[in-house]
Image: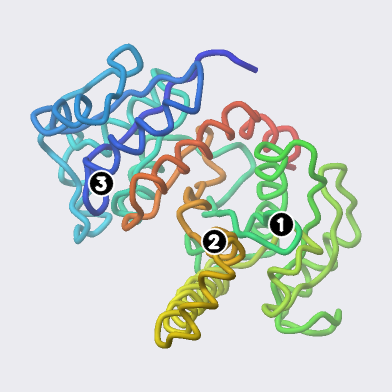
Amino acid sequence: MNNLITIAIDAMGGDNSPNKVIKGTSLHSKSSTNVKYKIFGNLDIIKPLIKKYNLSHDKVDLIHTEKLVEGEDSALSAAKRGKDTSLWLALESLKKDETDAMVSAGNTGALFLISKLNLQMIENIDKPALSALWPSKKGMNVVLDLGANIDCNVKNLVDFSIMGSALLKALFPMEKPKVALLNIGSEELKGNTMIKETYQFLNDNKYSLFDFKGYIEGNHLMDGNVNVIVADGFTGNIALKTAEGTSNFIITELKKAFTSSLIGKISSIINFSNLKNFKKKLDPRLYNGAILLGLDKPVIKSHGSTDAIGFANSLKVCEKTIRGNLIDQIKKNIK
């Protein structure tokens, strides 16, 4: 599928924006074809950056607004701020079918609420879920929900299993989704009532889209034996923050070990290639781009503190969800 797609971009959301947003968009444009960008924000700031980062004018439509959603705004106050913010206008362009997907590195709560105000839920889905990509020993995992819903029921977790599997197929068409429920143990009797009832439902009802593999414990998330990991938003967010913190700790301690002594520095030179590959494996920028699943249009949340490389990757994820027909995959499989 090489048809032209157009991505709506909130240029003003997140740290160091719009600088990182325009630089990241330029990086993405150089590696992608048949993609245009509709960029919303303060053009007095954006236009010089487009020139600085050599982003082709043929690939962009620019929409001026000086209003933006601040990082400290509550979701409700952001929505009340009005329909002229860069975030709202970008989502509105998606609602009007002027664009095919939308990306923002801005306020997460505001993005959720304004998305739900502008877009429809896919039929038969009650709650959206925030999903992201995690590396594993054997490839990539889709993990959801990462914080959109604290309280979930059995139907929600079943829907998350379907949506997560559809996302994996959209991003990696050759992969067969293998779903597991994040739990405190691998035995059938472990867990609370909701998780056990979800296990029973998925075990009794076979889906052509994915294979159900039962439970997975937190210490096996990166093993790669499954590739779609499902949890309620409370559990999933704790798992996400724990993984991020562990990754940062490992990288920091490795830097200390290889720079604190002469032997360490020599070892780092000898093992430079291996260390470079290891660091790349744990680089969160290369997995940036969380997808808000359940809406009838693709909405992508870039991490607010990422840089241009990370933002470019969120645009890559966005492009792949469109070309992989994510929404149609979900609609076809949801019950």
Dot 2: few (<14), some (14–19), or many (≥20) neighbours within 10 Å? few
Q: Provide the residue designation for mark 2.
A: 276
Which numbered disc, 1 or 2, marks the residue that appears first in the sequence?
1
Front-most of residues 158 and 134: 134
Query: Residue placed at 35% from the left, 54% from the top?
Result: 306
Q: Which mark is residue 281?
A: none
Report which quarter residue 145 is drawn in: bottom right
Q: Provide the residue designation for mark 1.
A: 228
Query: Residue placed at 46% from the left, 30% from the top?
Result: 101
Report which quarter residue 227 is drawn in: bottom right
Q: Provide the residue designation for mark 3.
A: 13
Q: In the figure, 149 relative to 104: above or below? A: below
Label 3 is placed on what type of residue?
Gly
The colouring scheme, among rainbow, by chain, secondary structure or one colour, is: rainbow
Label 2 is placed on what type of residue?
Lys
Q: Percent from the top left, x then y, of residue 87?
A: 27, 39
Q: Percent from the top left, x then y, of residue 170?
A: 67, 36
Query: Residue placed at 43% from the left, 21% from the top?
Result: 6
Quick one: SS at disc 3? loop
Label 1 is placed on what type of residue?
Val
Quick one: SS at disc 2? helix
Which numbered disc, 2 or 3, marks the residue that appears first in the sequence?
3
Which numbered disc, 1 or 3, marks the residue that appears first in the sequence?
3
